[in-house]
């Protein structure tokens, strides 16, 4: 029977696993606990054309417009046409989306949507509700689950076919072979000093794909969310709050966003985030303020805790009272539009390797993702990839490895890829990398800053430390990805969407699909050929125990 390994346990990974499990054996591995995924933290909801006054075509138009001309119309068409079916599937899996007073499915408005079409659950806990429902479905499905298994690398044979994963489990390296691997490892918000993402978002799947030689694209397009609490740890304040009527004001109490765009607070996310950052520069770095005191028919004190219970708790925990006072907010890194290049079924440039969710670049987001399209993309393309693997494996020209077998692991010494530190380099630390990325490869970029970033990033070599904890591997992944993002941002010399160059603010270029964005030495875990196996009698890799 075909065996598929899914890496990652957010909505994309679990959806892919559940779909694949209909016709094959599936193992899902994840680096931490199952619910430690970006999905759990999603607030706003899922955008889909579910209502009679809406249509997939209107949703597609909004998605294409937000993408600043760089979204792929075919991918957007799939997203918006199949989205409603995936939302219905989530409901069948037990996700109770909120209802309004009349008992109808409730829907919110978010920035750059022409219709209110964002469905949500437990107010602003949509991701948590979805994640828990999907975990329950996964537990009941027969999919083998391995938690706390960190992806070290992809197993790639001499013909560049992916046939498994190398994992670090409880301090031990191990190999799990498969006929196909679906990466659903999420994004890389931890590249930045300020982010809405949880600690697990270190770009491990994209880094592994880069090392294996997979094509990636659009890595320069990093989305910064405009409104993150500027007191205490960064905490997302959903765009849905502005959708309910909250405004953004500066030090003078002025709604300045209409200077940037006629849609003001509901302009596309890149426009709003940039305008806020510029205003903060003008007011010596002080955060702007989100004024929610008049939402909910002017009964904010009753409305806010009911509609946004999670944010309300976070605001209260910081000693703020948002029903009566505007709260300080600032932009923070939120979402990576680029990633591992895929087709419309999650297939990557490497046979046997699929990518879904935030680690993938399907083309639906272009240069700027439309609010609440991320959970939708994960569900739509997770399902497509899960459905595609078995027919692909049956039709493939490459030999199918139908059970864990013999492997001979040759991991090139990480030190071989070391580059000598630049003379003026500060020692590597994750915090130093995050600062460089925030300052030079952040909301606004220019050639000088990007060159400085490239110099710092090139000078660092994580593996000069004795590197082999999960955190060390994460650091290595972040460094590889930071170099790739900086290289992609350098290569795109004009501004478009979330990629804003202060040295070329206006022009829009055509959209190149880049091969691996930063040429890095390719390191592969290589299958032994049959011949080598019989010569060397390699041992069977230890089987991993399911949790
Ligand atoms: C939000 O709730 O503002 C975030 C939703 C998203 O990232 O699409």
Image (cartoon, rainbow, N blue to C red):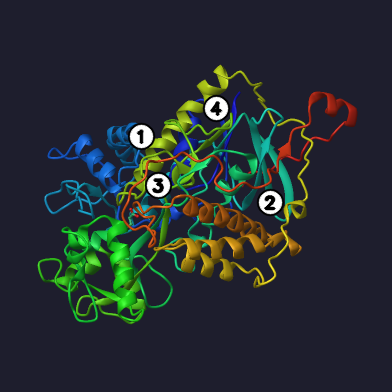
| Residue under pointer 3 | 133
Image quadrant of ligand 1 equals bottom left
N-terminal-most mark, 4 or 2:
4
N-terminal-most mark, 1 or 2:
1
N-terminal-most mark, 3 or 1:
1
C-alpha span from label 4 to label 2:
24 Å
N-terminal-most mark, 4 or 3:
4
Crowding around mark 2 (Cα neighbors within 10 Å: few <14, some 14 to 19, many 20+) is: some
- Tell me if residue 325 comes above or below residue 274 in the rendering: below
C-alpha span from label 4 to label 3:
22 Å
C-alpha span from label 4 to label 1:
26 Å
| Residue under pointer 4 | 24
Q: Is mark 1 on a helix, strand or loop?
A: helix
Label 4–label 3 contact, CB within 8 A: no
N-terminal-most mark, 2 or 3:
3
Label 2–label 3 contact, CB within 8 A: no
Residue at point 59% right, 52% down? Answer: 31
Asked if residue 328 shows in the view, the reply is no
Q: Disc 3 or disc 1, which is closer to the eye?
A: 1
| Residue under pointer 2 | 169
Judged left or right of residue 242, residue 384 is right
Q: Which residue appears farthest toward the right when viewing the image?
A: 535
| Residue under pointer 1 | 75
Q: Disc 4 or disc 3, which is closer to the eye?
A: 4
Q: x%, y% of residue 74?
A: 34, 31
Residue at point 63% right, 60% down? Answer: 458
Crowding around mark 4 (Cα neighbors within 10 Å: few <14, some 14 to 19, many 20+) is: some
Which of the 4 image quarters holds residue 326?
A: bottom left
């Amino acid at each position: 029977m075909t065996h598929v390994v899914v890496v990652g346990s957010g909505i994309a990974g679990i959806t892919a696993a559940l779909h694949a499990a209909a016709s094959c054996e599936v193992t899902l591995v994840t680096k931490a606990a199952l619910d430690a995924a970006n999905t759990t933290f999603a607030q706003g909801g899922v955008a889909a054309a579910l209502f009679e006054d809406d249509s997939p075509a209107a949703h597609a138009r909004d998605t294409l417009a937000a993408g600043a001309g760089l979204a792929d119309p075919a991918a957007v068409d799939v997203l918006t046409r199949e989205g409603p079916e995936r939302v219905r599937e989530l409901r069948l899996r037990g996700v109770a989306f909120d209802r309004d007073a009349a008992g109808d499915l409730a829907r919110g408005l978010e920035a750059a949507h022409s219709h209110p079409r964002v469905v949500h659950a437990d107010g602003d806990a949509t991701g948590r509700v979805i994640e828990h429902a999907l975990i329950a479905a996964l537990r009941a499905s027969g999919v083998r689950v391995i938690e706390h298994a960190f992806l070290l690398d992809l197993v790639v044979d001499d013909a560049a076919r992916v046939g498994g994963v190398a994992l670090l489990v409880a301090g031990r390296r191990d190999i799990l072979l498969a006929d196909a691997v679906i990466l659903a490892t999420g994004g890389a918000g931890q590249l930045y000093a300020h982010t809405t993402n949880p600690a697990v978002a270190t770009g491990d799947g994209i880094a592994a794909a880069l090392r294996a030689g997979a094509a990636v694209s659009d890595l320069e397009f990093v989305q910064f969310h405009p409104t993150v609490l500027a007191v205490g740890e960064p905490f997302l304040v959903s765009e849905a709050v502005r959708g309910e009527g909250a405004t953004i004001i500066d030090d003078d109490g002025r709604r300045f966003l209409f200077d940037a765009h006629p849609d003001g607070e509901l302009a596309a996310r890149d426009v709003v985030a940039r305008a806020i950052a510029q205003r903060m520069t003008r007011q010596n770095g002080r955060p702007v303020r989100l004024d929610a005191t008049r939402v909910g028919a002017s009964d904010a004190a009753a409305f806010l805790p009911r509609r946004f219970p999670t944010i309300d708790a976070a605001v209260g925990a910081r000693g703020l009272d948002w029903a009566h006072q505007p709260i300080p907010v600032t932009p923070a890194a939120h979402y990576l539009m680029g990633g591992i290049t895929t087709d419309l079924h999650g297939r990557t440039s490497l046979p046997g390797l699929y990518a879904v969710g935030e680690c993938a670049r399907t083309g639906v987001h272009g240069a700027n993702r439309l609010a609440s399209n991320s959970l939708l993309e994960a569900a739509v393309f997770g399902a497509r990839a899960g459905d595609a693997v078995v027919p692909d494996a049956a039709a493939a020209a490459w030999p199918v490895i139908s059970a864990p077998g013999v492997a001979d692991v040759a991991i090139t010494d990480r030190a071989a890829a070391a580059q000598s530190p630049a003379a003026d380099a500060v020692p590597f630390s994750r915090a130093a990398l995050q600062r460089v990325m925030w300052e030079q490869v952040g909301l606004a970029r220019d050639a000088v800053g990007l060159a400085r970033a490239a110099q710092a990033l090139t000078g660092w070599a994580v593996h000069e430390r004795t590197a082999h904890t999960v955190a060390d591997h994460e650091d290595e992944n972040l460094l590889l990805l930071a170099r790739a993002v900086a290289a992609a941002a350098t290569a795109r010399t004009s501004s478009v969407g979330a990629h804003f160059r202060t040295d070329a603010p206006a022009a829009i270029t055509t959209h190149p699909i880049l091969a691996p964005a930063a040429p890095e030495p390719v390191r592969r875990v290589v299958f032994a050929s049959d011949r080598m196996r019989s010569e060397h009698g390699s041992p069977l890799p230890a089987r991993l125990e399911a949790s």
